[in-house]
Structure formats: structure tokens, C-alpha cells
Amino acid sequence: MVRFCASQSVSIEVPTFSVPIEHYFSQTERLVHALVDPSQVTVLGEDIFRLRMRPLRFMMLALEPVTDIRVWLCQGRVMIQSQGCYLSGHESLSNRFSLDLQGVLEPLTSAGKTTLSGQADLQVRVDLPTAFRLTPKSILETTGNGILNGVLLTIKQRLLHRLVADYETWATQPLPVSSVGQ
């Protein structure tokens, strides 16, 4: 069994609007669509989403991980946790594959400014096919860790650019007529 892991942290200053970002965080579907390409997301239920990742190249394999994640708000923080996974098109390898994603994103306010602070940890364990057992473990781990880091960096970039922009759009849109005066 080979273990790959990656971790990313982020700190982003967010603009101040009359609607605090904690209210935006309660819109979990909107939040997920800001972090991940909406074409890769299926809503399974309240706060549960299926993410179909773009195919990843690992040595001679093209792997397409599919994972279910739970995204919920807990004490003002967004919590993200994987719930299960499989490799699309590789059923035999799926039985020997596990993915664990843990993340948190929280607003911190100081001196009237709000900063989002977050951390994501991604770990994959896989029992590789026999052909890969001849490859030195250090090469496998370096390659696998690099791929996972790339996945987290992509999500981080979307967080830095899309989440703040989407929050601004959401916070500045006019209230629906039916809710004015209520």
C-alpha cells in the first residue's frame, strides 16, 4: 500500500458587505460551485455532493477519481469531509484505493477586516498493480504527492479568485421583491 498526501493553507482578505460572509457560507451548493467546476458536481442531498475530478495521469494510468463530500457550516466555519470514493473505469483498482479529504474555511475578523483562513488535507492510499512495484517507492511518492498538491492548488486558485467574486455578486444583488419590507 502506497500513501500520497498533500496539504494547502490559504488566507484571503474579503471585502465587507452588509451581508456577512457567514450567510454566504450557508449556501453550500453555491459555495461548492465556486470552488469546483459546476460540470464536475452532482448534488446528492443536503450538504452532500459528488465530485468527478478531471482525469489524472499517474505513470501509465489515467485515473478519474469520483468522491462524495459533505460540506456543512459548523460554528461559522465551513467544514469539508470526503464520504467515499471510487475510480471511474478502474473497478479492480477502486477496491484498493481510498481518498480522504478534510478541510476547513473560517472567517476571522480583526480591526473591521475579515480574512478567510483555511486548510485542506488530502490523502490517498492505493495498493498499486504489480507492474508499479518495480518502480522505486520514492519516485511513486514524489509523483503521487505532486499530483495531489496540484489538485489542492487548483482548488486554492478557485478559492482565491472565484469564491470572493461570487460572494461579492451574491452579497450585492438586490433582495427579491417578495422579501422587501418583511
Image (tube, rainbow, N blue to C red):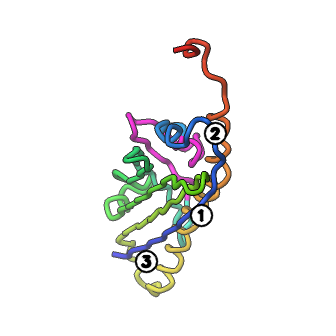
Residue range corresponding to the magenta coloring: 31-55
User: Which is closer to the viewer, label 1 or label 3?
Assistant: 1
> Of the numbered discs in the image, which one, if any, rests on residue 153?
1
Whether residues under marks 1 and 3 lie with C-beta atoms below 8 angstroms apart, the answer is: no
Q: Earlier in the sequence, mark 3 or mark 2?
A: 2
Q: Is residue 100 above or below residue 59?
A: above
The residue sitting at 56% across, 14% down in the picture is: 181
> Of the numbered discs in the image, which one, if any, rests on residue 143?
none
Q: Earlier in the sequence, mark 1 or mark 2?
A: 2
Q: Is residue 19 above or below residue 181?
A: below
Q: Earlier in the sequence, mark 1 or mark 3?
A: 3
User: Which three-letter amino acid code belongs to the residue tagged 1?
Assistant: Leu
Q: Is residue 130 above or below residue 75?
A: below
User: Which three-letter amino acid code belongs to the residue tagged 3?
Assistant: Ala
> Of the numbered discs in the image, which one, if any, rests on residue 131?
3
Q: Position of residue 15 (x, y in %)?
A: 66, 47
Q: Is residue 43 magenta?
A: yes
Whether residues under marks 1 and 2 lie with C-beta atoms below 8 angstroms apart, the answer is: no
Q: Position of residue 49 (x, y in %)?
A: 43, 42
Other-residue count near label 1 (Cα within 10 Å), few / some / many at <14 / 14–19 / ≥20: some
> Of the numbered discs in the image, which one, if any, rests on residue 17?
2
| Residue nearest the observer in this picture, 101 or 64 | 101
Dot 2 lies on which element? loop
The residue sitting at 57% across, 48% down in the picture is: 35
User: Which three-letter amino acid code belongs to the residue tagged 2?
Assistant: Phe
